[in-house]
Image (tube, rainbow, N blue to C red):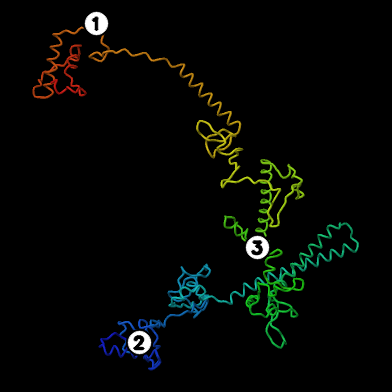
């Protein structure tokens, strides 16, 4: 329904409108008509057929879906190059002082600067240019080729044709000149060797190829048939067959046979897979794709792509000769590296196949051992007792070891017997490792014995009672009892002053000399934090 605006409708009107739309979609009712008398498709969704409210559309229409904002002033035309409109006879006021044209001034004049301008000579007044103004549309502003004259490219084509004609004429003259020189040499002028003649013939072949290059350029040219029944075209078209040959799609008319693509004229699978190979002349396109030089060409393409991905500047289509040369060098280097690796392995490990001769029994495939079988095919006599095997790998030597892990036992530890190492998955060092381990053990034992011999039994330290001032107490130290009592009283006063600084006098004289009695008083008054009876001392 293409309604113009949303008006209030009752429930009944809304139901009737829906029924009318369903009838129009089913074709039972005529379609709605717009302002121009055209029918509106009833299957158009409402969000597309409903006009916006700001357009104030009175009747149903689809004009709001069309380009209704179109400016007729837009154009795609271009300037008329080199057009002149008027040429004056004398100089006009406000014209160019150099050439006399009214459409520009002397600063933007493109003519040659005259010695005396047209303003003063009043001669050779240039015509006025045609000035046009265009209002381009969106596409016209962005059109790169707007105003391009295609006929101007004919000059480029003509120049290349003249160059090609001069080149062909020059090559033809050179060919004729060499032919004349060759005829003169054959008539009697002797002095040139056979090698020079061969070189001249090669040059002639090259020149002939250059002369015929223009003819080969027309390889893909298709010309119109003349005086033929069907008209059409003839010429060189690729992938054509001979008229007497049977078409690919006629070799097997079974619909389930090989698929034929008429666009590319290709049939990949074999149309007659059960036919005799000697009598079959066509085996499908895959036969040629997987044989001959096709595989080499495929390898060459793969090598070029991989080399380009790894950062080399190589491209199969842009420089095929370079790609082929790099591929050949790659093959040579690869074979050289392969042979070098093989020689290195043989030099390191030897060639058991060439050194040791195989037993005669294995070469002839027979032995003198006699085996008897019963009717059921079971062996009765002659079979050797097979040793039972465990699920673990046996006799597997790793890391250059010649024995397995667990073949050596020492100091409650397992190891390798070949090198006497106690570390699993270690690299075998052989006899040299054993000798080095023994030498290290002997050296360690010798160092321990030397250290024990050099160490002396420590003498017990004499207990010394420290002096009160930090040195050893001499034996003849005697403390004066009076001085000690005075020092104790002095220490009490000092401690009292530390607790209450108000009792400190101003005229205090300090004496830096410390007597043994002062040190003893300090020691006696000192609080011992580690003493459990310190709370009861003071």
Residue 358 figure quarter: top right
Q: Secondary structure at mark 3?
A: helix
| Mark 1, residue position | 476
Residue 190 - label: none
Q: CA distance from mark 1 to mark 3?
A: 113 Å
Residue 158 vs 360, above or below: the answer is: below
Counting residues from the start of the chain, the first of labels 1 and 2 encountered is: 2
Q: Residue at x 71, y 48 (%)?
A: 382
Contact? badges 3 and 2 (CB < 8 Å) = no
Residue situated in front as seen by the camera: 89 or 397:
397
| Mark 2, residue position | 2
| Mark 3, residue position | 298
Counting residues from the start of the chain, the first of labels 3 and 2 encountered is: 2
Crowd around label 2: few <14 · some 14–19 · many ≥20 (10 Å)? many
Q: Position of residue 235 (x, y in %)?
A: 70, 78
The reply to whether residue 102 is visible in this rendering is: no
Q: Secondary structure at mark 1?
A: loop
Nearer mark to the viewer, of 3 and 2: 3
Q: Position of residue 147 (x, y in %)?
A: 51, 76
Q: Residue at x 76, y 64 (%)?
A: 206
């Amino acid at each position: 329904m293409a309604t113009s605006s949303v008006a209030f409708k009752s429930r009944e009107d809304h139901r009737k409108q829906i029924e009318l739309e369903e009838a129009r979609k089913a074709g039972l009712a005529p379609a709605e008509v717009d302002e121009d008398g055209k029918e509106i498709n009833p299957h158009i969704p409402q969000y597309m057929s409903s006009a916006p409210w700001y357009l104030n559309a009175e009747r149903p229409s689809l004009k709001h879906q069309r380009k209704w904002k179109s400016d007729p002033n837009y154009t795609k035309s271009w300037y008329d190059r080199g057009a002149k409109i008027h040429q004056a006879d004398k100089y006009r006021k406000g014209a160019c002082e150099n050439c006399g044209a009214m459409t520009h001034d002397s600063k933007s004049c493109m003519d040659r600067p005259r010695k005396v301008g047209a303003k003063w000579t009043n001669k050779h007044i240039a015509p006025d240019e045609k000035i046009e103004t265009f209002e381009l549309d969106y596409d016209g502003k962005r059109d790169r080729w707007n105003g391009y004259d295609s006929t101007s490219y004919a000059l480029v084509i003509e120049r290349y044709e003249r160059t090609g004609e001069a080149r062909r004429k020059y090559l033809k003259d050179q060919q004729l000149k060499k032919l004349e020189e060759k005829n003169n040499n054959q008539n009697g002028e002797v002095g040139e060797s056979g090698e020079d003649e061969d070189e001249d013939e090669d040059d002639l072949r090259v020149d002939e190829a250059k002369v015929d290059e223009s003819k080969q350029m027309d390889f893909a040219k298709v010309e119109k048939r003349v005086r033929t029944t069907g008209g059409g075209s003839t010429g060189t078209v690729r992938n054509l067959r001979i008229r007497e040959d049977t078409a690919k799609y006629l070799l097997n008319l079974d619909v389930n046979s090989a698929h034929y693509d008429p666009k590319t004229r290709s049939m990949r699978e074999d149309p007659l897979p059960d036919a005799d190979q000697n009598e079959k002349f066509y085996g499908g396109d895959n036969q040629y794709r997987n044989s001959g030089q096709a595989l080499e060409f495929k390898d060459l393409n793969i090598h070029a792509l991989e080399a380009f991905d790894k950062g080399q500047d190589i491209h199969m289509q842009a420089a095929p000769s370079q790609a082929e040369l790099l591929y050949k060098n790659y093959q040579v280097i690869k074979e050289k590296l392969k042979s070098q690796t093989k020689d290195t392995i043989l030099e390191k490990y030897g060639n058991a196949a060439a050194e040791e001769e195989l037993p005669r029994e294995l070469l002839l495939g027979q032995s003198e051992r006699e085996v008897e079988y019963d009717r059921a095919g079971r062996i009765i006599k002659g079979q050797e007792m097979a040793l039972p095997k465990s699920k673990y790998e046996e006799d597997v030597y790793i890391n250059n070891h010649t024995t397995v892990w667990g073949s050596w036992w020492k100091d409650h530890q397992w190891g390798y017997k070949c090198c006497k190492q106690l570390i699993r998955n270690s690299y075998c060092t052989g006899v040299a490792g054993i000798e080095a381990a023994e030498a290290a053990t002997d050296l360690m034992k010798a160092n321990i014995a030397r250290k024990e011999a050099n160490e002396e039994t420590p003498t017990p330290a004499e207990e010394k009672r420290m002096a009160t001032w930090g040195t050893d107490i001499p034996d003849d130290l005697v403390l004066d009892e009076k001085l000690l009592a005075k020092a104790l009283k002095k220490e009490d006063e000092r401690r009292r002053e530390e607790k209450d600084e108000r009792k400190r006098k101003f005229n205090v004289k300090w004496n830096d000399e410390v007597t043994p009695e002062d040190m003893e008083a300090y020691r006696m008054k000192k609080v011992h934090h580690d003493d459990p009876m310190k709370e009861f001392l003071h």
